[in-house]
Image (cartoon, grey):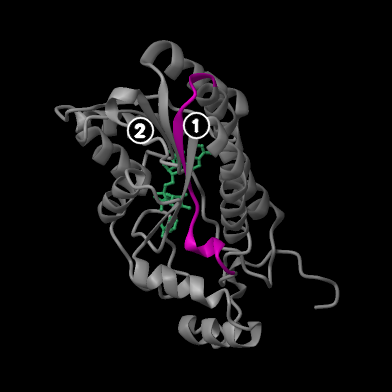
Amino acid sequence: MRNFIARPEHGVVWISGASSGTGRALALKLAGEGYKVAVTARNHDKLVELQVEAAGLSGSIIVLDGDVTDAEDMEHIMASIEYEHGALAMAILCASVYQPVHGEDLNRADFEKTFAVNLSGVVNCLLPAIRHMKAKGQGQIAVVSSVTGYTGLPTSAAYGATKAALINMAESLKFDLDKIGIRIQLINPGFVDTPARKDTFPVQALVSPEAAAERIAAGLKSQAFEITFPKRFTYMLKFLRILPYGLYFALVNRVTGWRERPVDDSHRSATPHPAE
Ligand SMILES: NC(=O)c1ccc[n+]([C@@H]2O[C@H](COP(=O)([O-])OP(=O)(O)OC[C@H]3O[C@@H](n4cnc5c(N)ncnc54)[C@H](OP(=O)(O)O)[C@@H]3O)[C@@H](O)[C@H]2O)c1
């Protein structure tokens, strides 16, 4: 069965998390290909800057700012697309935060914020988008996860947990969405050089947001379920999943140099445990 591929004539593309990094580069790329792109993030000024930068391209940028953690906001954005700008042909759910987590000093707020944006934020966009697409009988959805969702990596206890959940969510939804004409895809980039990057450990195969946007734009037009790049690196991480755990932990410790790193006390809470 061939799946629906959204073309500019099918309607609007909605990108959440488009004020910076990969989401922004992808919005410009798709506007350059003639798509009408509705962009969402909290920073209104950055979205307007993006709209100005896109002036003159064959497509256009529609600024619809909002916070993905607010379900009502996302319902309003969906209604605004539908009633003011046209049918929703494609939703690319990219909004995310990355808060490095250190196992020796866990902080509840890091988990709660990451889960709210990266996981509930995706659900808040998926619900109105799928309802709308189901009524139209067609649509395309791309969930942006990460290779950190494949396996546990240092500092990724919160971020990686949300990305692993998104991989599972997209895989699970595919079974039903296929039956109602909605095509779901999973985007698993390797490391991209964006404001989200924090130098917690040396990364390999870093790509620019523009290169990421090129790869994603091509993948959105393919029949593939997963869009992942650069493949040599991401397939190596996929392979790590099937290694016995002893080997897996030894390899990741070696490549990241994590075991040799001293415990970093700088982020520790002010009140020590009475046993310390
Ligand atoms: N960079 C990497 O190495 C890498 C690797 C694999 C996967 N990814 C994934 O790629 C996607 C894009 O990441 P990026 O690296 O381009 O990060 P980024 O530059 O930090 O962009 C994150 C975007 O999410 C938006 N956002 C954050 N919280 C939001 C909220 N509550 N409501 C609405 N929007 C919100 C931000 O806009 P505002 O702050 O204006 O709201 C921003 O536009 C993410 O899903 C990320 O997990 C990144």
Q: In percent of the image, x 45 and y 16: which residue is there?
A: 82
Left or right: 256 with respect to 230? right
Q: Is residue 99 above or below residue 103?
A: above
Q: Please state, as top left, top right, bottom left or bottom right, where the N terminus lies in the image.
A: top left
Amino acid of disc 2? Ala
Residue 248, numbered circle? none
Q: Nearer the viewer, residue 124 or 67?
A: 124
Can residue 165 be seen from the camera position used here? Answer: yes
Q: Residues within 10 Å of mark 1 (few under 14, many from 20)?
A: some
Question: In the rendered image, which residue does mark 2 sit on?
Answer: 6
Q: Position of residue 152 (x, y in %)?
A: 60, 69
Q: In percent of the image, x 35 and y 72: which residue is there?
A: 232
Q: In what element is the residue under mark 1?
A: loop
Q: In percent of the image, x 77 and y 69: which residue is there?
A: 272
Can residue 261 be seen from the camera position used here? Answer: no
Q: Nearer the viewer, residue 169 or 154?
A: 169
Which mark lies nearer to you, 2 or 1?
1
Q: Say if the magenta span includes residue 268.
A: no
Identify the magenta region.
135-151
Left or right: 96 with respect to 33? right
Q: In what element is the residue under mark 2?
A: loop
